[in-house]
């Protein structure tokens, strides 16, 4: 209403009349309509008209009148519907009565239901009692029947036991079968007391019957531990019945398996697998038995085959087919396996000449298989397969025999030694001074050439194990016949003669499994004569040449000859198998395969020798080296004689193996010498105690060690290899001494004299390199010339070092400028020594300057 009418704010404004276009009555009607209907005035003039306060009473009065009219209308309408309301009230009261009556009826129904339920419970209880009585009656009847059946079963068990005691086994077994059927039909739980008692009693009777039946079977078919099989029965049907009874009792399989195992262990195995010390067994038979028959002599395979067939025939004739089905297959298979492993395979001969007799024995194998088939027995496939594999089996046996011979040879080496001869030939010009009697060089080397002979003289003395090699293919430095330039060591080097670091140890073995750094460097000692020394005649035209021969001896064991014998057997047998007389032999295809065994023989020797040689001698490595070289020479000669080129690789491998053994020994001795010289402690303060004593002991121990090794190896190695080996060891020691002295920064005069004395002690080892002097030369008073410089590359340098230690500065300068000192020492080496030996002075500086300028 406030939105439609704006009342006046003061009484002075009430006197102002409303717009003439809208009367107060219209406004009152619009206001009443808004209150009653909620509708707004449609005219904007009424909406915008001002509503004075003075007009409110009239408006309120109209509203009050409208309210009264509405109340009267409501009252009038209520009076018209009063009768309907009364009817509704009466119906509601009637409904309430009906509800109360229904409640009473429901209570009566519940009460009647409860009475009926009690009666129903009584009925059900009575019915349950009736059912219980019926079940009790049925149970009693069933119990009576069960007890009756149990009594019958118990009677049958007793009857079965009685029949068993009377040896009426057939009826006893029938009764026991009936008991088992009745027990299965009893309507009782299996764990019930009655079932348990009856089952235990039946089991006891069954066990008794089984024992009785097995005893009866054993009386009929008996195998004694002494190897006697007895079958005491005239009618085979009795055995059939026993088998049926055993089957009914469920012990047929067990009984026959036991019989089969006893037959194998007590009869077949004594025949087919006898003790190695004897006695041997065959079979002899009677009317109802067959038994072992011992003998001292080893029977032939034919006899063994005959005994097995006689046993199988006896079993076939006296046992039912049902028993044969169980035992025959296993017996034939086991017998053939034992026959192959214990008789036929070991009987394969190693020698080719024995194969003809063995092949005749092999012809009996098909007949044996045929006889088994005629008996109806299983014929194992192993027999035919084994016969077809005879070439491979024979080759395997030959291989195993050869390797076992090698093992036995190496293991049983008794320490017997012999001298082996090595012969070297070389063509030398007849104009060479070696043949000129009036030549000075020839006179000097008469002793050296005392052992040289003409080819014609050597031809009758050449042994089977000698090796002839061209001088172009050999390392000939060991003989010391090279020219002067070749004899001189290289400056500043400490290499030891005879070392060869190119060959790896793994290559020597040919296996390639070891690490290259695990072993010392392989050494290859020179073993042949060198070229003759150069003379003026070399510049002349070529003249007629003459062949000279050098002989030398070294010590070997009897092992290489035995190894050659083993290899020779393989090659000779291979050639034999290629002959026409063996063309039809089963072994003829194995002829070429035999030629592979020598390689295995060599490999076996290389594998076994290091182990067993070390147990025979302290110089095992050198003996092994000699044996390897000698074996290689014998193999090379053998290969040439038989045209057996396949041995080339084995020859190379055995030579590498020998050099490896030599290298190991040299490495060990070098290590010992180096350790001994380490006691000098670099010669520091060598003129003062206690260092002086240490140096003296170290030098003496080193010299003694070299002499001891020389004495030990002298009877083993050839002269050339001995000189080279000792020279290599001495070179190692000298090289360490030179390096230790050169490393000294300051050497006093007493120390210089002391060092020269130490070097002089080592120089006394020169007598180890004196050549052997013939009786003629010794009678003529010729003094031998030591060949130390030839075999010790740094020997001249060592001698010059002694001179330097004892010489003045002027002498050293003279040796450098006028002598050959510069051939052994480098400029820096000599200057360092001068600085260590001489105090700083004008003379020293001048000498050093002259040495530098003249280099």
Image (tube, rainbow, N blue to C red):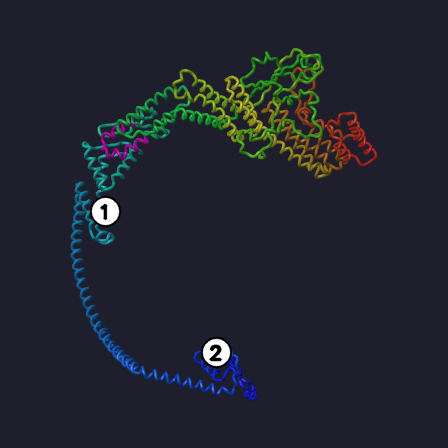
Is residue 233 magenta-colored?
no
On screen, residue 601 versus residue 441, left or right, reads left
Q: Residues within 10 Å of mark 1 (few under 14, many from 20)?
A: some
* Viewer-nearest residue: 551 or 419: 551
Q: Quadrant of residue 294?
A: top left
Q: Say if residue 808 shows up in the picture.
A: no
Image quarter in which the C terminus is found: top right
Residue 41's tag is: 2
| Secondary structure of the residue carrying numbered label 1 | helix
Q: Quadrant of residue 92?
A: bottom left
- Look at the image and give the residue range highlighted in magenta: 308-335
Image spot of residue 161 (x, y percent): 18, 45
Q: CA distance from mark 2 to mark 1?
A: 121 Å
Image spot of residue 399 (x, y percent): 45, 26
Q: Is residue 532 above or below residue 200?
A: above
On screen, residue 429 versus residue 249, left or right, reads right
Is residue 312 magenta-colored?
yes
Type of secondary structure dominating the magenta stretch? helix
Give the residue at mark 1: 203
């Amino acid at each position: 209403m406030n939105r439609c009418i704006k009342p006046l704010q003061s009484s002075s404004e009430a006197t102002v009349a409303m717009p003439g276009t809208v009367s107060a009555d219209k406004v009152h009607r619009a206001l009443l309509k808004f209150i009653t209907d909620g509708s707004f005035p449609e005219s904007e003039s009424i909406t915008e008209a001002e509503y004075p306060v003075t007009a409110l009473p009239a408006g309120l009065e109209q509203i009050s009148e409208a309210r009264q009219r509405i109340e009267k209308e409501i009252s009038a309408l209520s009076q018209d519907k009063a009768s309907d309301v009364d009817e509704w009230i009466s119906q509601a009261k009637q409904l309430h009565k009906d509800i109360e009556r229904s409640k009473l009826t429901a209570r009566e129904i519940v009460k009647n239901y409860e009475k009926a339920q009690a009666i129903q419970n009584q009925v059900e209880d009575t019915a349950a009692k009736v059912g219980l009585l019926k079940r009790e009656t049925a149970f009693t009847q069933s119990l009576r029947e069960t007890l009756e059946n149990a009594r019958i079963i118990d009677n049958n068990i007793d009857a079965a036991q009685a029949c068993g005691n009377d040896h009426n086994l057939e009826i006893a077994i029938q009764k026991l079968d009936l008991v088992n059927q009745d027990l299965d039909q009893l309507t009782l739980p299996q764990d019930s007391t009655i079932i348990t008692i009856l089952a235990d009693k039946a089991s006891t009777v069954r066990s008794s019957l089984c024992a009785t039946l097995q005893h009866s079977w054993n009386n009929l078919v008996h195998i004694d531990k002494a190897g006697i099989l007895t079958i005491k029965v005239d009618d085979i049907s009795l055995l059939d019945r026993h088998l049926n009874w055993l089957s009914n009792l469920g012990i047929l399989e067990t009984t026959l398996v036991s019989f089969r195992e006893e037959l194998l262990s007590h009869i077949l195995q004594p025949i087919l697998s006898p003790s190695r010390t004897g006695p041997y067994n065959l079979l002899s038979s009677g009317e109802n038995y067959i038994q072992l028959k011992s003998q001292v002599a080893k029977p032939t395979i034919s006899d063994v085959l005959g005994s097995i067939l006689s046993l199988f025939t006896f079993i076939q004739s006296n046992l039912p087919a049902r028993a044969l089905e169980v035992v025959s297959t296993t017996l034939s298979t086991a017998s053939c396996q034992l026959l192959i492993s214990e008789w036929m395979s070991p009987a394969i001969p190693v020698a080719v000449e024995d194969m003809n007799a063995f092949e005749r024995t092999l012809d009996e194998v098909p007949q044996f298989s045929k006889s088994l088939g005629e008996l109806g027995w299983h014929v194992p496939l192993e027999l035919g397969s084994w016969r077809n594999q005879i070439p491979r089996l024979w080759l395997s046996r030959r291989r195993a025999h050869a390797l076992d011979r090698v093992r036995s040879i190496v293991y049983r080496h008794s320490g017997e030694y012999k001298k082996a001869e090595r012969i070297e030939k070389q063509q030398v010009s007849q104009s060479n001074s070696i043949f000129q009697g009036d030549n000075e060089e020839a006179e000097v080397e008469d002793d050296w050439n005392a052992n040289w002979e003409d080819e014609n003289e050597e031809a009758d003395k050449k042994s089977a194990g000698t090796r002839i090699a061209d001088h172009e293919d050999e390392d000939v430095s060991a003989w010391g016949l090279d020219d002067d330039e070749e004899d001189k060591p290289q400056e500043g080097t400490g290499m030891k003669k005879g070392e060869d670091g190119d060959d790896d140890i793994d290559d020597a073995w040919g296996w390639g499994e070891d690490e290259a750094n695990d072993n010392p460097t392989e050494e290859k000692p020179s073993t042949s004569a060198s070229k003759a020394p150069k003379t003026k005649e070399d510049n002349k035209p070529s003249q007629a040449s003459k062949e000279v021969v050098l002989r030398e001896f070294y010590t070997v064991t009897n092992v290489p000859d035995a190894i050659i014998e083993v290899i020779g057997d393989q090659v000779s047998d291979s050639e034999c198998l290629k002959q026409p007389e063996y063309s039809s032999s089963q072994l003829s295809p194995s002829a070429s395969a035999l030629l592979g065994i020598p390689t295995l023989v060599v490999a076996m020797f290389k594998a076994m020798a290091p182990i067993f040689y070390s147990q025979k001698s302290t110089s095992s490595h050198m003996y092994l080296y000699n044996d390897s070289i000698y074996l290689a020479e014998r193999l090379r000669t053998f290969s040439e004689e038989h045209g057996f080129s396949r041995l080339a690789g084995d020859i190379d491998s055995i030579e590498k193996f020998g050099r490896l053994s030599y290298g190991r020994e040299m490495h060990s001795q070098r290590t010992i010498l180096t350790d001994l010289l380490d006691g000098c402690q670099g010669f520091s303060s060598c003129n003062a105690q206690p260092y002086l004593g240490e140096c003296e002991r170290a030098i003496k121990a080193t010299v003694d060690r070299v002499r001891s090794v020389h004495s030990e190896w002298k009877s083993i190695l050839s002269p050339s290899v001995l000189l080279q080996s000792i020279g290599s060891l001495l070179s190692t020691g000298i090289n360490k001494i030179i390096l230790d002295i050169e490393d000294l920064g300051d050497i006093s005069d007493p120390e210089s004299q002391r060092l020269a004395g130490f070097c002089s002690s080592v120089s006394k080892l020169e007598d180890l390199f004196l050549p052997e002097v013939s009786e003629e030369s010794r009678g003529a008073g010729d003094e031998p010339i030591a060949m130390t410089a030839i075999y010790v590359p740094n020997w001249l340098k060592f001698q010059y070092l002694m001179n330097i230690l004892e010489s003045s500065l002027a002498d050293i300068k003279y040796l450098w400028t006028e002598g050959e000192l510069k051939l052994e020492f480098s400029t820096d080496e000599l200057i360092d020594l001068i600085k260590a030996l001489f105090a700083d002075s004008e003379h020293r500086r001048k000498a050093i300057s002259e040495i530098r300028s003249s280099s």
